[in-house]
Image (tube, rainbow, N blue to C red):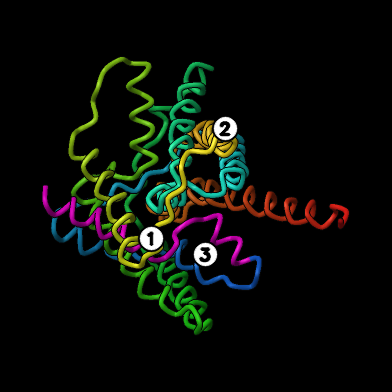
Amino acid sequence: MLIPLTLAFLIGWVSQRMGLCLVAAITMALNKRPTLFVALASCGLFGLLLTPLYQQLGVSQPFYQPIAPYHHIILGGFLFGVSSVLNNGCSVGTLTKLARGDLSKAFTIIGWVVGIVLWHHLNMDMTEKKTLAPSPSSVNYLLAIGLVIASLLVLVRYQREKHYVSLSILLGLLTSALYTFEPQWTPSLLFYDLSKAVWIQQWHIHPTRLGIFAMLVLGMYCFTIYRRTFDYRPINLLDSSRYLFAGTLMGVGASMMLGGNDSQILLVFPTLHLATTLPLMAICSGIVLSLLLSKYSVRQRPAH
């Protein structure tokens, strides 16, 4: 019990240190600063490279792939990306901002639950339509190693942000280690199970998962106190309404592609199959298009 809670705290600390958010990472990449995006996308790959070690220890990594129509996966990922920009943060980015003191971000989490329940009541629930991915093959390892090496070269190339190299590797090691203790620790999976408890009217969430989530947020919060970046912002009606709406769309999108961006990056994308790379590509496409349209609309506004 103590080890997974400690790992969760460290993951929260490192996530806050990196400013871990896919929206922020792509925003930086569009401004010719790709290091955070490369570091974020590489986290799961670093964990994949440890699979042989875990196999020797008799522990399996819970990599999975969605079993759903491709148009559901693509549309769900795209919707998740667009709504993440509207929310000004992905699932992890929401938690880092909440831990930094923005209380309105709690409405994003409420929206997630509403969106997942809404998707279920539309009779489109795909709860059981996912399966463990096949064990990584030599081709998967070669691809992962190649991408990791390319990622490291990109990260090292931008010397101003070279700290992302060590942080990305550390985060990959911590998250893969936590998966060996609790395969369902990610926030998006917890939000899904919270939503599921609404329609089945039964509570099946183990207290360990709640403790891990609490320690994850506590780690994020403690880093802000350590770096004196905590910025308390009380609940704002306008922001809360926007976050609730965006969170609802994020919940629907996550349901369509069977997992939020945290699960996609850490558990789905690393296996590098077609069905496991599509969700992350769709999310990134939605974020990029939304950011470009937002930037274009700002430019078209008349100057006062």
Among all residues in the image, which is located at the extreme left?
2
- In the depicted structure, whether residue 46 falls above or below residue 86: below
- Residue topped by disc 2: 241
- Residue topped by disc 1: 16
State the SS at label 3.
helix
Is residue 10 shown in magenta? yes
State the SS at label 2.
helix
Tell me which corner region of the image, top left, top right, bottom left or bottom right, holds residue 122. Answer: top right
- Residue topped by disc 3: 37
Mark 2 surroundings within 10 Å by alpha-carbon count, few (fewer than 14), some (14 through 19), many (20 or more): some
State the SS at label 1.
helix
Mark found first going from the N terminus, 2 or 3? 3
Residue at the spot x=61%, y=39% of the render? 79
Residue at the spot x=52%, y=64% of the render? 37
Report the amino acid beneath label 1.
Gln
Residue 95: image location, x then y, percent: 40, 48
